[in-house]
Amino acid sequence: MRLWFSLVVGIAVLVAAPILVIVAHLFVPASEHWQHLAGTVLPRYVANSLLLMLGVGAGTLVIGVSTAWLVSMTNFPGRRLFEWSLIVPLAIPSYVIAFTYTGLLEFGGPVQTFLRDFFGWRSAADYWFPQIRSLPGAIVMMTLVFYPYVYMLSRAAFLEQSVCVLDASRTLGRGAWSTFFGVALPLARPAVAGGLALALMETLADFGTVDFFSVDTFVTGIYRTWKGMWLPAVAAQLGAVLMLFILALILLERWSRRGRVSHTTGYYRQLPRFQLRGITAGLASLACAIPVFFGFLLPVTAMAVWTWQSRQLIDSRYVEMALSSLMLATISAVIAVGTAVILAYGRRLVPGRITAVAVQTAALGYAVPGAVIALGIMIPFAFLDNAIDDFARSVFGFSTGLLLTGTWAALIFAYVVRFLAVSSNTIEASLQKVTPSMDGAARTLGLTAGQTLRRVHGPIMRASLLTAGVLVFVDVMKELPATLMMRPFGLNTLAIRSFELASDGLLKESASPSLAIVLAGLIPVILASLMIARSRPGQSS
Amino acid sequence: MSLLIETIRHTFGPKTVLQDISLQVASGEVVCLLGPSGCGKTTLLRLIAGLEELQHGRILIDDQVIAEPRRQMLPERRGTGFLFQDFALFPHLTVLENTMFGLAQRSSKAERRAKALDALEQVDMQDYAAVYPHELSGGQQQRVALARALAPSPRIMLLDEPFSNLDTRLRAQIRDQTLHVLKSTGVATVMVTHDPEEAMFMGDRIILMHQGHIVQTGSPAELYAHPVNAFVTTFFSDVNAISGTVEAGAVQTKFGTIKAHGLPDGSAVDILFRPDAVSVRNGHCALSSHRGEAAPNGYRTASESVSNIAEGRDERPLENLIEADVLTTRLLPGATLVHLRIPVNGQSDTPDLHLHARVPCVSPMPEGTKVQVHVPLDQIYVFPKS
C-alpha cells in the first residue's frame, strides 16, 4: 500500500510542479521589464482576453443551450441527424478553422473574388468587407468550434431530467415555455455552467487563432515574451496573472459539478417531445443546421478541395511529419493512460484525504494553457541543464549541453501534464464498473493488488482504456503552443506544419496537414456521439 | 480452523464504529453478527478478511496472529473466503473461470478445473460452468459466489449479508442450501445480517451488535427468550409495551406481579412482551402459541400448541385472565395477528391498552368479540424506562 501511496503522491507532485513554478512567479518581485510590460501591453492583453471570453461565452451559450433544448425536447425534421452532428465541429482545432475561413474570406479568396466578379468591383476601395482577422473574427471562429462543450453538457442534463418533474410542472398549470424557463433550465444550469467553463478554458488557452489574427491575448503575450524577447521570468509572470483567470474558471467548473442536481425520482420514460410543425419546424432545423454547416461542413469541404489542389505537396517529408505526430501522440496517450490507471487504482487502494487531493491536483493541467505548461517545464529544465553543464565544465572540463530542454521526453511530459485529466476522467468513470467488492473478492481469493489490477480491472476496463487513449491521442495531435515552444530541433508535426504554412500566407497549402488532424479528431467525437445517445437512463440505446 | 478476536477497536475519523469487540468462532460453527445497519458488523468482517486495516486489538486464525496494529497479513495470504452482498462475480470470466480464480496457480490446470467443478457441484451449478455471470439469476449468482469462495478451502468463511439481494421466496431456499453446504464443509463461519429471522435460521450462535458494541451473545433461543435489554427485545420482534413503576422491588401489571431485578423503587420502567407470548381465549376455545412456562428453554413445541387448539381447550388452568375486546384480526403467513383493546376501568383520561397477539391461524373474529387474554409472567420483560 505504501508503494501505491508513494506513486499517487509522486505523480501528483510531478504533474503539479510546472503549474506551481508558474504560480510561484506571482511572488517574484517585479522587474523593470515587467514594469514596462504592465504599463504598455498588459492592459491590452487583459482587455482582449476578457472580450474574447465574453464574446465566446455568449455565443456558445446561445448556440449550445438552444440547440440542446431543440434536439432533446422537441421533434422536427432532421432531429436525429442533428443530435450527433451538432458535436462534430469539436473535431476541428480553432486555429484550423481560423486558417480555413481566412482562406475563404480574405481579399484573394473565393468569396471576395466572386463578389468582385459579380458586381464588377476592381479593388478593395470599391466595397466594404468585414475583416476576418480581428477580435470579432476570433470570437466567431472559437464560438463555432467550442459551442459543442455547452451543447453536450446541456443536452446530457436535459436528457437526465426526470419526466416526473416536468409532468408535475405541467399539471400545476405551467405551459411548455414556462416549464422550460421555470424548471428545466434551472435544473440544467450547473451543467450549462460546466460546459461554459470548458469552452472558456479552451478560449483562454488558444494560441493559433489569436496569433494568426494578431489579437494580443495573454497566451500570445507569453509566447512572444518568451520566444521573441527571451524573458522567461516575465513570461512566467504573465502566466501567473493568467492563472488567476483560470482559477476563476476552475472554481466555476467545480461549483457546477457540486451543484448538479441528483433527481429524487428514478422514474424515467421517453421524454415527451413537443412536435414542431410548419414554420417553427423549419426554423428549428435551420437553427441546428447553421452551426453544423459553418462549424464543420463548409470548412472541411474547403480543406478537402485545397488538399486536392495542393496534392503534390504530399511527399516523403509530409509522411515523416505525420509519423512524428503519430508517435508523439501514441507515446503520450500510453503514458497518460498508464498514469491515470495508477492514480485511480491507487486512490481506491489507499482511500483518504491525501490521495484524493493528489488525484485532483494531477488533473489541474486540463485548465492550464499549453503555453503556460511549456513555460513551467522549460524554466526549471533550463536551470537544471545549466547547472549540470556548469558542473561538468568545472569538474570534467567538457560541456554536457542541453540534456532536458528540447527533448522528446520534455515535450511528452508537457503533453501528459496537459491532458492527464482527459484520460483520468474516463478511467475513473470506468473504474466504477469494478465494484469495491470485486477488489475484495480477488484479494481474499489470493491475488495481490498488482495481480488484481492485471487480472480483474484490466480486462473489465479494456474498452475505456482504449477510449481514454484515443482522447489523449487526438488532443496531442491538435496541440500547438507547447509543441511550438518545446519542440526538439528538427521535429515537425502536422500541427506545426499547418501553423507555419498558414503564417507564411500559404493557406491552401496548410489544408492538407489540417485535414489530417481533423480526420483524427473525428474519432473521439464519434465516440462521444455514441455515448451521448446511450446516456439516458432507462432508455435502451 | 477457529477464529479468535481480541479487543478490537476501530474508528473512521471521529466516529467510533467498533468498541472492544472480542469473540470466538469454533471450527464448524456458524456465528451470526446481527445488528441494525451502521452498527459496525460489516467493518468487523472486513477487518477479519484484511480488507480494512486493523487499528487496535488482535485477530488470530488457528492460534496464528493474522492481524495486530502495524503487523497485518495481506488479505490474499489469510485464507479467508468472503461472500459479498453483491456477489462480486467477475463479469469478464465464466462461472468456471470465476470458481477457478482463487485456486493456487501452482497446481495444474486440470486439477484446478476438477476442484472448481467439485465446488460448483456442491451448490448444484455444475451445468452452468461455461456461462457468464450476467446470464444467471440472482440466486444462481449467489451460489456461484459461494462455490468460488469455498473452492480454495478457506480456513474461515465470511458472509456479508449474502441473501439481501434475493427476493423473499428465493431467499428462504438459498439460505437453506447455503447452511447445508457450510455445515458439510465444517468451516468456521461468520455471517453478517440485519435480519433477525435470518440470524436465527443460520446461526448456531448470534452476536447482537448495536452502535459498535456487542449487546448480547448466545444461542438464538437465549437471545429471543432472555433478552438483556429493551433493544434486544425489540430487535427480534414487534412488542407490546406498557409503562409502569417499581414498587417494593416489583412491578404490578394487569397480568400479575413481576420482579424488578435491581431496579430502585419508584423508578419508571418499560414492560415489554412479544405478541406471540399472548394467548387469547374465546369462550370455550383457547388460542395460544405461547411458550409453556415449564419448558426449560422457554418454548413449547409446535405440536403442543397445535394440540391446544385441536382439542379446543387448555389443559392447565390459567391465572390472571384479563377481559379484552377484539378490534380486528389479520391473517398472516403462519399466524393470525389479533388486535385487542383492554379497557382501563374508570380512568377516562388514560387511553385503553392496545395489544397485539400473534396466535396460530384461526378464522377471523368479528370486531367487539369478548375474549380473555393471558401472558405468562416469565415472558414479560421489565427494563428501565428508555
Image (cartoon, rainbow, N blue to C red):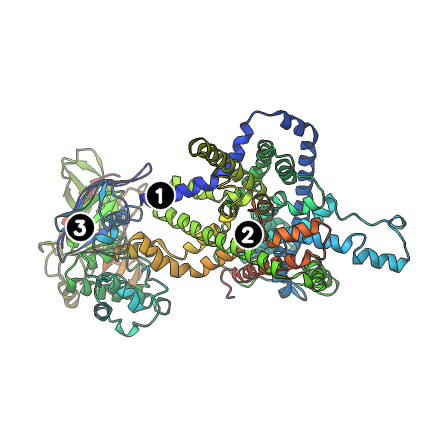
Q: How many marks?
A: 3
Tell me, yes or no, if residue A467 can be seen here.
Answer: yes
Q: Amino acid at mark 2?
A: Val
Q: Secondary structure at mark 1?
A: helix
Q: Is residue B27 left or right of residue A79?
A: left
Relative depth, front residue between B333 and A384: A384
Q: Are marks 1 and 3 in contact (CB under 8 Å)?
A: no
Front label number (2 vs 1): 2
Relative depth, front residue between A49 and B108: B108
* Label at residue A5: 1
Q: Position of residue B181 (x, y in %)?
A: 19, 65
Q: Which residue is mark 3?
A: B223
Question: Could you confirm whether marks 2 and 1 are on the same chain?
Answer: yes
Q: Give the residue at the far bottom of this rendering.
A: B127
Q: Is residue B33 left or right of residue A226?
A: left
Residue A155 image-quadrant placement:
bottom right
| Mark 1 neighbour density, 10 Å: few (under 14) some (14–19) many (20 or more) | some
Distance from the alpha carbon under mark 1 to that under mark 3: 45 Å
- Which residue is pictured at 60% across the width and 25% down the height? A31
Q: Secondary structure at mark 2?
A: helix
Q: Position of residue A114 (x, y in %)?
A: 83, 59
**Does label 2 or label 1 sit earlier along the sequence?**
1
Q: Amino acid at mark 1?
A: Phe
Q: Chain of mark 1?
A: A
- Which residue is pictured at 56% across the width and 52% down the height? A475
Tell me, yes or no, if residue A72 can be seen here.
Answer: no
Q: Position of residue B78 (x, y in %)?
A: 21, 52
| Mark 3 neighbour density, 10 Å: few (under 14) some (14–19) many (20 or more) | many
